[in-house]
Image: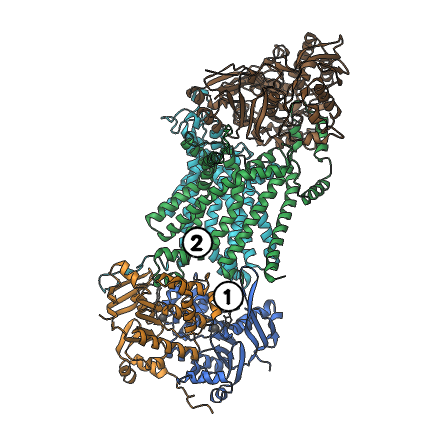
Amino acid sequence: QNGVLRVGTSFSCSSLNPYTTTQSSCLAALRLMYPSLGQASGSEVLPDLATSWSSDDKGAVWTFKLKTGQWSDGKPLTAKDAAFTFNMLLKHVNGPTARRARAIANVEKAEASDDQTLVITFKQPTSNAVGRLAQILIVPEHVWAPLAEGDGAKIATFPNDEPVVAGPFKLSRFAADQVILLEANGDYFGEAPALKGVGIQFFTDSTSMVQALINKQLDLVTPLPVTSVEAAKKAGITVASYPGLRFHSWLFNSSENQKASPEIRDIKLRQAFAHAIDRKKIAEVAYLGFATPGDSMVPKVTGDWSNPKVVPEKFDLDLANKLLDEAGYAKGADGWRTTNGRKMSYKVLIPTNVEGAEGLRALEIVTADFKQIGVELVTEQSDNATIAAAITGPDNTFADSTIAQWGWIPQMDPDFILSVVLCSQIGGLSETAYCNKDYDVLYDAQAKEVDPEKRKQTVWQMQEILERDRPYIVTVQQNNVEAYAPGWSGFIENPIGFLDYTSNRPFMSMKPGN
Amino acid sequence: MKLKAALTILGLFFLAALSGPLLGLDPGPIDVQHIFAAPSAQNWLGSDDAGRDVLIQLVIGALPSLVVGLSAAAVAILIGGTVGILAGYSRGWLDLVLLRIMDYFIVVPALPFAMVITAIWGPGLGHMIVVIGILLWSTTARVVRAQVKSGRERLYVQRARALGASHFHILTRHILPQVLPLIGTTGSLAVALAILTQAALEFFGLAGTGVLSWGTMIRFAFQRDAMLNDAWWVVIPPGLCICLVITACYWLAQSLEQKLNPRLHTTDLRIRSFALRASAEKP
Amino acid sequence: MSALLELKSVRVEFAARGLFGEGPRVVAVDDASLTVGRGEIVALIGASGSGKTTTMRAALGLQPIDAGEILLSGQALGKMTGRALKDLRRRVQLIFQDPTEALNPRMTVDEIMREGLSIHHIGASAAERRQMIAEALGFVGLTPPCDFLARHPHRLSGGQRQRVAIAAALALSPDLLIADEPVSMLDPSIRAGILDLFARLRAERQMSTLMVTHDLPSAYHLADRVYVMNNGRIVEQGATRAVFQAPRHDYTKTLIRAASGRPVA
Amino acid sequence: MTSRSRYLLGKIGIAVFGIFATLTLNFFLFRVLPGDAISSMARVPGGSVELKEALMRQFGLDKPLWGQYLDYLVQLAQGNLGVSYSSLRPVTDEVLRALGNTVPMTLLGILIAILVGVTSGIIAAWKHDTAIDNVISNIATVIYSAPTQWIAIMLVLAFASYLPVSGASDPFAFANDIWSILADRVKHMILPSLTLALATFGQYTLVTRSAVLATLGEDYVSAAKAQGYPVSRVLAYQALPNALVPIVTLIALSAGTVIGGSVVVETAFSWPGIGRAMYDAIVQRDYPMLQGALLVVTIVVILVNLLADLVNMKLDPRIVE
Amino acid sequence: MPAIEVEKLNVWMQAGDGRIIHAVKNANLSLGNGGQLAIIGESGSGKSTLLMALLGLLPPNASVSGRVIVNGVDVFEGPEAALAGLRWREVAMVFQASSNPLSPVHMIGQQLTRLLVFHGHDPKRAKARMRELLDMVRLPAQCEQLYPHQLSGGMRQRVVIAFALACQPKVLLADEPTTALDPIVQAEIIELILALRQSLDLALVLVSHDLALVGRMQGDLAVMLAGDIVEYGPVTQLMTKPKHEHLRTLLAALPDFGLVEEPA
Ligand SMILES: Nc1ncnc2c1ncn2[C@@H]1O[C@H](COP(=O)(O)OP(=O)(O)OP(=O)(O)O)[C@@H](O)[C@H]1O
Ligand SMILES: Nc1ncnc2c1ncn2[C@@H]1O[C@H](COP(=O)(O)OP(=O)(O)OP(=O)(O)O)[C@@H](O)[C@H]1O
Ligand SMILES: [Mg+2]
Ligand SMILES: [Mg+2]
């Protein structure tokens, strides 16, 4: 209404500190306020503050030509601010700015050779350098320099409730986990957005969110719960459903420390399991058709990065039974298989607050099918922190857990999701304790590869290794389902979703009708 | 009347609860064709978001709800009643210590606490019973304590003391009958709270196991936006079942209270409370 | 021989406590000394509100005392524990002034009567106990017993309640009976019967009695000795006849004059 | 020092001790939890072992438990509740903000519940064993028996088109005159408060009914009848005051469950209150926030119960003796 | 119009164990305005029940037959409003000491003041009147600040008497009003009641076990035994020539005073 786009979301945002928050909705809102070198569009980067960029032959020194602008407190925005931002992040990367470490990996230094030129020097060639750098939000030096002094602890505790910004919008109100209100910034250096303002409201209950959309108290909802699609459509709301990045998967404990059920490390067993998971049914029933059978950990929406040879196993219980028989897991008289004198029964850990009812329904489907291959599954649900501890525990030894169901939201660039299964992530992001030295070597290679084509080959190779060893079985690839009220146009189907932490394009292209 | 109704309802639910495992009832396979199908001749109460029969799920779901609710309440009443009586009856440090412990449990917000314990212990029906019981005993204890404190001062308790009655005797013969109706009422409140807390835990996905119960049915109805799909038959019945069971428990408690309290009807508030007979004949 | 009951300079104060802090203190019993010997019947008479009830409650340890000492059979009440205390509780019975409050409304007469017997394991069998209860009820004129046994106290008349309380105390064959206005609500014939009973029990079993009463004729006829209380103090004591016939204290004089139906002025 | 202030100080001392003990217990209890704030915070694009360690250092979680506890106490002594892990704002601000949302909503709900509950309880006791009694007690029972989340969804369905069903205020309202802001707040409060009221009033009805009924057997009630008091006065002068002890106790007790239980209401209505904050804090293992929220809730509940003790003492003089 | 008119009153009580007690049998009584009636009788003979019936205050386990007219109001069958109007404005009662008619959670003064105000006393003057009443029954002023359980038995009974006299009733039903009192106070209270009777032209029904006191009364005497009124007539006549055996035993049980001699 009157040019303000009111967005409802079930994500939440509790802090507007651009370096400590990890909530994607915060970052998406911050991206509307702060400038950055560029905005992501698929695997590309479109110019924003930087109008153009180039690198030396080795791909180690990158030079960016920048626009100049004005901060909301009247001070000028120049390349110095950009250089300051990168240097500040570098300086404190082992402390307060650790969350941005990956984006500035390998960067050695940043310099502003003049007000409109930024030079960034890498220690070694780095793939997707511009894409990484464009993720960083550039902040005003005059505000942040005092915070960055000393050990920089203030960076992490700075609430930033009255941000000094230079992007297309500026903040007019922020109430943590309730609402962010933005109004168009007249001094924006780029092309003015079509929206006069943006409001993002955070909901804890999806039903009331959908009600608000239907009652015209909201213009756009992201994500729209799949179960309310019919109701929204009935109310004349436009529903967009298109492939997204988020996948759901089964993860197997690969650690030798896990002694109770060593067979879980048997690749043949995992193979058989993969054939007993009815991905189609999960997509159709649990996700009501708003998902597709999953394959690689690098989703198909990332385009070329996803290895086309990695495809979902066909659902075939007979085959699964046969594979298990062949692997020596014999069925007992009661129909359950045994190994080492034990019934094959596994606890499946599931974090219900993130996997949701869909995840539980999916697990029910699998549990029923597994009964037919003589394997018993027992659901164990809790919140994500507890489940994370249960998966890795005790003390990161991975000694207890066997199987879990959880998901990931990869980035358009494959680097991040591929890093999850590195040996070095044990104790970090690893949920499987999977460790393969060959894989790690390939990872390092692709990270240095500046030529996209060559990098692609390596990335594909890595996906094949993962398909063979199966630390994960990707079950479904979830669609992004979003809805907006009639009268709005310019909606783009963005794989990351409408609240995109790498790009302001979804908002910038939205237009109020009539 | 109430007693009969309560016993009938509870009996029926217990029967249902037992018939689930005995008859091996099964709500059928997950079925895409029947997602939120309206009630029909085959599915009297329609089907849910996974296309399974709601009625059969209700029957199966009775067992965990009843078992957890009633046993947790029993735990709560047992601990709460005992501690409340002890604290109210004793003076000095024991009362103080028990009171502090009670305060702690009253202050601790139930849901996060339940979550913590299920997380530490791991899920399971038994654990849930103990968790809920532990959460709820303090209310009973506080109410009972207050009543015992004032009841202890009555003259007939002093008379019993003068008679040489042991503390045990005084507690069981004089104090307990005094607070029994109250324990009955708070006890039935505890049953209600137990079943409701269980449902709330399940609502937040903290119940641990994947057991089908009324609470999980509500949770799924909620999370799968049944009401937006006009599928009232998924939302209303489990809530109603919970209502009915708890109501029956109240009725039970109320009828017991009436039996236990002979003084309840020595006066009432009518201007004339006696009966008038026409003749002087002996009735 | 030591006295059965001995109060030495007992003092009891009440704090009229408000919501915050304490109000002025009331001295209910002030420096009261009193003895009851074996087989003796002692009457405590005195003004209403003079502290008689409080003294009796203190004598049995139901009321904490602020000063003084209480000896039962020569033993300090405060030091007794366990078996001795329990045994004492049987040997000394108290009849409360207010029979309604003193009887548990949730118990029937039968249960009330049986309570003391079962606490002290008196009576070998249920039948014997039933017999003892019937006998005790008979003493106080509640006959036939079966008419009363199943009733709750609030379904009895005032005098009947009082008699239940007396019967319950006597059923335990106490050595010392402390009775706070035990017969105030009884008609003269029953009252006389019960006072006779006290005298008979003294003769038969050496039962001692400490009785508060406002009925001076009863005290005159029954008691060996009297204590006169006024304003928390024991103002006069002595052999009954001596006190009644030659009262020394002004209050006693007024009291006796009032009781004999003469104008008090 | 007068005996009055000594008495008061004693009571306050007990309350302070209670708060301290509760906090200490909470500190350790919640730290026995599996999972920690850092793991979930580090589960983000860019997460690594190094990030985890950096965060541990940042939040002082690399210290031993006792050290953390001491830090916590020192901070607390300075009136500082620490900084929330998730919002990075001082916990004091966060808790006060949440409380500012919870208190009016809860208070309104509780007031409605007490009003309706006690009144209907009295009426039910007065007309006991009649149709009116049956109707009241059964309605109270049935509604009280309904799960809160269920009541919430029913109300949402019934009133979604008339009243706002989420948030504490219209987030997109730019009006700033005090009256329209207030009106907006009240409008948002109605459904959550009503849910809370519906979910709780039943127990007040039932307890009031049985407590009042219990006094009806006493002599002073029939004496009051004899003294010519009409029913309403008998109830107001004799029956109710004598029944108040258990009622007040229960109401005070429900303060804990109501605040704790507001989690459900606050979730169902996206209400940014303390219950919700507590739930979020526990899921995110945001200890400073959790402790802060618990501290506040603890204080509130202890104070309410202290108040109830004092009130009861005033109500029934026999308790003091 | 007589103050009290009782015709063929029967009261039955359920004892709770299935038995039914015939507590009052076919009682006939009548009492003129300003008249006096004493009732004596064995404990449990139905005196209190009879009195309660006059105010229509029998418990729910009672059933009645017959007619009771008090101050022109048919207690059993007249309109409820009339019966309600009767209570305490016209007819007040001193409850037997065995009952606890005082609310345990209110102070004495508060309860008495409230009663006065309710029955139309000017709220400003009620306090003064309350003090006057307490003084009348010889209670010290600080008693108004006490709760019933802080009073001695006699003091409680005096409070109950003060309550009965509070609204200057036309009929006073006194159920053993002085049992718990010492002889001095007892005498004072009896004088007070008799004096009030005279000045207010009060009709008085007095239940007592004190035959000496009854002997001093003018008016009628009713003797009850097991629910029956076995004797009914002028006091002087009955006391001197008891017809019924029961009254004779009662009189015989009267202990002889033996202390009438003037103390030296
Ligand atoms: N509420 C009641 N329920 C059943 N029976 C009762 C009730 N109140 C009194 N009675 C019985 O009715 C009879 C008459 O009782 P009532 O109280 O009138 O006696 P009373 O003459 O006043 O005796 P007292 O001098 O002992 O007070 C007694 O046998 C008594 O047991
Ligand atoms: N619990 C109490 N709190 C405060 N004062 C009390 C308490 N109990 C008794 N008193 C006071 O103590 C005094 C003595 O009371 P007590 O009951 O001993 O008198 P009593 O001699 O038995 O009188 P009565 O013959 O009237 O029963 C009275 O002034 C009374 O008000
Ligand atoms: Mg006394
Ligand atoms: Mg009587």
Spatial distance from mark 1 to mark 2, Cα to Cα? 25 Å
Q: Position of residue A455 (x, y in %)?
A: 69, 10
| Left or right: residue A180 compared with residue E81 | right
Q: Position of residue E243 (x, y in %)?
A: 26, 82
- Badge 1 crowding class, 10 Å Cα cut-off, few under 14, some 14 to 19, many 20 or more, is many
Q: Is residue B67 visible?
A: no
Task: Give yes or no for contact between labels 1 and 2 (Cβ–Cβ under 8 Å).
Answer: no
Which residue is at the front of the view, B194 or D292? D292
Q: Which chain wears blue?
A: C
Query: In the picture, which chain is orange?
Result: E
Q: In the displayed structure, does residue E120 sit left or right of residue D2?
A: left
Badge 2 local density, few (<14 within 10 Å), some, or many (20+)? many
Percent position (x, y) of residue A339?
63, 26
In the rendered view, would you say D98 is above or below E263? above
Secondary structure at badge 1 equals helix
* Front one among D156 and E100: D156
**Image quadrant where residue D74 sits:** top right
Which residue is labeled 2 in the image?
D211
* Subunit of label 1: B
Q: Amino acid at mark 1?
A: Ala
Q: Colour of chain B?
A: cyan
Which chain is brown in the rendering?
A: A
The residue beneath circle 1 is: B160
Q: Disc 2 marks which amino acid?
A: Ala
Residue D92 can be seen in this image: yes
* Colour green maps to chain: D
